[in-house]
Amino acid sequence: MRDSNGMISIKTMEAVRQISEQLNPCPDLRVQPITSDTRAVVVIWIDGLVDDVRLQDAILAASRLISETKRIRPHRLFAVPGVATHAVETVSEATKALLNGCAITCVDGINRAQAWHVAHFPARSIDRPENEPTLNGPQEAFVDNLSLNLSLLRKRFKTSEFKVETREVGTATQTMVAILYHKAIAKEALVHEVRRRLEGVVVDHVVDINQVREFINDPRFSIFPTTEETERPDRVIAGLLEGRVGLLVDGSPMCMMMR
C-alpha cells in the first residue's frame, strides 16, 4: 500500500488512485470528473455521507471557477457561499476528510486537494425523553448525533461562558467526544482531570458513552457516585450551572455528568 502520509499527486488520476488504494475495497467511493477547458479536475466523495444538494452546488461552483481561471495558484482555495472548505496535502488527510463526509476536489497540476464540508450523516429526529419523561418540562431528548446534541444545548444556554472542547477517541473509530463546562463556575481542577483521563483512553473503538465511563470513572468500590447519565438537555444545563462537567460521545444519546 502507498504511504498514507505521502503528498497528493499533481496528476488528478494518480491522486484518485492514491486515495482509492488507501480505502480499497470501497464500493461506495464516487469519482466525478469536471469538464474544463483549462485543466483536468475530479471530485471524490463517499456515497451516503454527503448532502447531495450541497455537493452539486460545490461541484458546479468549482467547475465555473476553474473554467474562468486560466492560472490557479497552489495556495488558492475556491469559495462557495454556505460551504466551508479546507486544504488537504497528504493522502491520509484526504481519506480522513472523505470518511468525515467531505468531498475532495483534485486539480491537475496542484499537489494538494480541497475538502468541501458537505457532510450529511444519517440521524434520527429529535424526540421526547423515553427514560426520563416529564409532563411540564421540555419535551426534547438527546439523539445519536453530536452536532445536534450540542445545538440542543446551545439553544438553551446562550452564554459565552459555555465551553465545548472536543477530542477524538478510538484509534479505529476516531469517535468525537465533547467536554462541556461553564468556565466561570466549573473548577479548573475538575476540568483538567476530565481532560487528563480522557487523553488516557487508548482503545481501538468507542461506540458508546458507557465505554468511556469505564475508563475515566473513579474506582468501582467508591461509596459516592461521581458520574450520572441523562438524556435531557435541560438537566445537563442545570448540572453545568452547579459546576459539573459534561461529556458527550458522538453516536450516544446520553450525556455523562461529573462532579
Image (tube, grey):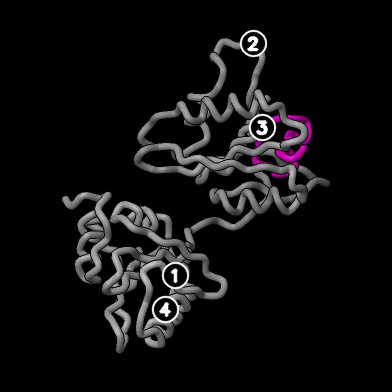
Q: Earlier in the sequence, mark 4 or mark 2?
A: 4
Circle 2 sits on which residue?
Answer: 223
- Mark nearest the camera among 4 and 1 is 1
Does the magenta-highlighted stretch encompass residue 241? yes
Q: Earlier in the sequence, mark 4 or mark 3?
A: 4
Does the magenta-highlighted stretch encompass residue 135? no
Q: Nearer the viewer, residue 62 or 258?
A: 62
Circle 1 sits on which residue?
Answer: 77
Position of residue 186 measured from the top left corner of the image (x, y, whole percent): 72, 30
In the displayed structure, would residue 185 be above or below residue 189? below
Q: Earlier in the sequence, mark 3 or mark 2?
A: 2
In the displayed structure, would residue 20 be above or below residue 106? above
Q: Quadrant of the C terminus?
A: top right
- Mark nearest the camera among 4 and 2 is 4
Position of residue 82 measured from the top left corner of the image (x, y, whole percent): 56, 71
Crowd class of label 2 (few under 14; some 14 to 19; many from 20; radius 10 Å) = few
Q: Earlier in the sequence, mark 4 or mark 1?
A: 4
Q: Amino acid at mark 2?
A: Ile
Image quarter of residue 115: bottom left
Crowd class of label 4 (few under 14; some 14 to 19; many from 20; radius 10 Å) = many
Query: Which segment is the magenta one?
Result: 230-245
Q: Amino acid at mark 1?
A: Leu
- Identify the residue at image location x=52%, y=25%: 197
- Mark nearest the camera among 2 and 1 is 1
Circle 3 sits on which residue?
Answer: 245
Left or right: 224, with 60 as reference point: right
Cα distance between the residues tagged 4 and 2 = 60 Å
- Mark nearest the camera among 1 and 3 is 1
Q: Which mark is residue 62?
A: 4
Cα distance between the residues tagged 4 and 3 = 43 Å
- Identify the residue at image location x=30%, y=89%: 37
